[in-house]
């Protein structure tokens, strides 16, 4: 019998299941028939499937007719509906749970990676979500990030390499899931943080300054690079001149260079370093929030 956490999957069944049903354990087995299951490993859509959920786990999955619904089970005909793995938003800052949590769940996002928000608030939300009193995604969080200068977002100052290990230890004691590094760290402080994180077996991710570079960050074990920082875009010499940064914020992002970036991409792949672009359309986001506000 397979036991897959039900929160890892999201059923596209508008009008049939409420969000509450998908976020709390049902009182009796739930059997969904005539589903199309999207197999993301093999890249296949499997039609005429039956899925059975007991408590918080999927306990059976197979072709229609192969899975027998137990007595007393709730059976739902899911014809023309789809089952997919729950999706993740890998870079969020949780500032408004009333707006964003329902949007996450409604759009199939059952997990988020918070990249620095108020730790006490996040801890409270995680407990409420786990208990079923708050509808929201699973939250993986960094807590305060490590920075070499002042910033408005919660952070810990690491001005010298000697500050690195105590800062990492304090975050581990706090209970964070990973360490986030930021862009004002000196090269020496950055590598001291990397050594401390590796020695303690906790992942680190975040920004990469140009003094460190994407290649060195990847070789040091950084799990992910946010905003495509320190990863140049390939372009022609003419484009490089035309697209030269005119403002500091432009210089912080990946520059345009004529050099072949294939060796860097190969290194990122070899080291298992992910890149999180964090790109979005602000006008579409504004329209989405406006439409959602009219529904609640």
Image: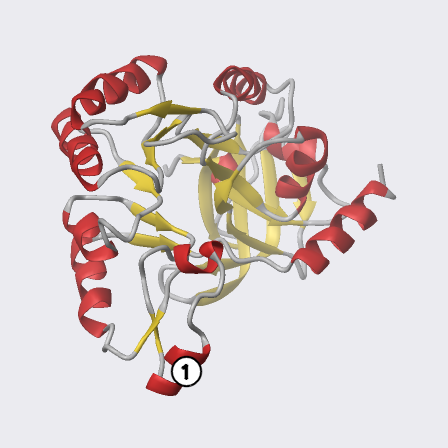
Which quadrant holds residue 200? top left
Residue at position x 62%, y 22% in the image = 27
The residue sitting at the front extreme is 246
Number of numbered discs overlaid on the protein picture: 1
Q: Nearer the viewer, residue 284 or 3?
A: 284
Q: Nearer the viewer, residue 273 or 161?
A: 161
Which quadrant holds residue 35? bottom right
Residue at position x 62%, y 35% in the image = 22
Q: Is residue 118 left or right of residue 30?
A: left
Q: Look at the image and name its color scheme.
A: secondary structure
Classify 59 as above or below 129.
below
Q: Is residue 237 left or right of residue 105?
A: left
The location of residue 177, given as percent across then percent down, is 35, 27
Classify 234 as above or below 22.
below
Quadrant in which the C terminus appears: top right
Quadrant in which the N terminus appears: top left
- Neighbours of disc 1 within 10 Å: few (<14), some (14-19), many (20+): few
Q: Is residue 135 left or right of residue 210?
A: right
Q: Which residue was labeled with disc 1?
A: 239
Q: Is residue 250 left or right of residue 158?
A: right
Classify 177 as above or below 109.
above
Residue at position x 13%, y 32% in the image = 195
Q: Nearer the viewer, residue 209 or 57?
A: 209
The location of residue 16, given as percent across then percent down, is 74, 44
The location of residue 13, given as percent across then percent down, is 69, 49
The location of residue 119, given as percent across then percent down, is 48, 19
Classify 262 as above or below 215.
below
Instruction: Give the secondary structure at mark 1.
Output: helix
Q: Nearer the viewer, residue 199 or 58?
A: 199
């Amino acid at each position: 019998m397979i036991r897959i956490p039900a929160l890892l999957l999201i059923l596209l069944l508008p009008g049939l299941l409420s969000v509450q049903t998908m976020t709390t354990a049902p009182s009796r087995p739930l059997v969904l028939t005539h589903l199309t299951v999207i197999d993301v490993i093999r890249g296949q859509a499997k039609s005429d499937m039956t899925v059975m959920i007991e408590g918080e786990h999927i306990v059976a999955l197979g072709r229609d007719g192969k899975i027998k619904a137990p007595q007393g089970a709730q059976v739902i005909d899911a014809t023309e509906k789809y089952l997919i793995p729950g999706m993740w938003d890998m870079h969020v800052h949780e500032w408004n749970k009333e707006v964003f949590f329902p949007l996450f769940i409604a759009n199939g996002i059952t997990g988020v990676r918070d990249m620095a928000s108020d730790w006490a608030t996040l801890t409270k939300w995680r407990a409420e979500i786990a208990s079923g009193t708050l509808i929201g995604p699973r939250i993986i969080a960094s807590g305060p990030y490590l920075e070499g200068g002042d910033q408005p977002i919660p952070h810990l100052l690491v001005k010298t390499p000697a500050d690195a290990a105590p800062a990492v230890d304090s975050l581990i004691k706090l209970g964070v899931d990973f360490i986030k590094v930021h862009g004002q760290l000196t090269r020496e402080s950055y590598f001291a943080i990397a050594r401390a994180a590796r020695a303690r077996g906790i992942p680190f991710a975040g920004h990469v300054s140009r003094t460190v570079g994407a290649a060195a960050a990847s070789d040091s074990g950084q799990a992910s690079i946010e905003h495509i920082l320190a990863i140049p875009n390939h372009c022609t010499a003419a484009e490089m001149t035309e697209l030269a940064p005119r403002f500091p914020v432009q210089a912080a992002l990946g520059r345009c260079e004529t050099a072949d970036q294939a060796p860097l991409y190969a290194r990122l792949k070899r080291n298992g370093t992910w890149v999180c672009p964090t790109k979005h359309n602000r006008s579409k986001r504004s329209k989405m929030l406006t439409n959602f506000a009219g529904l609640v």
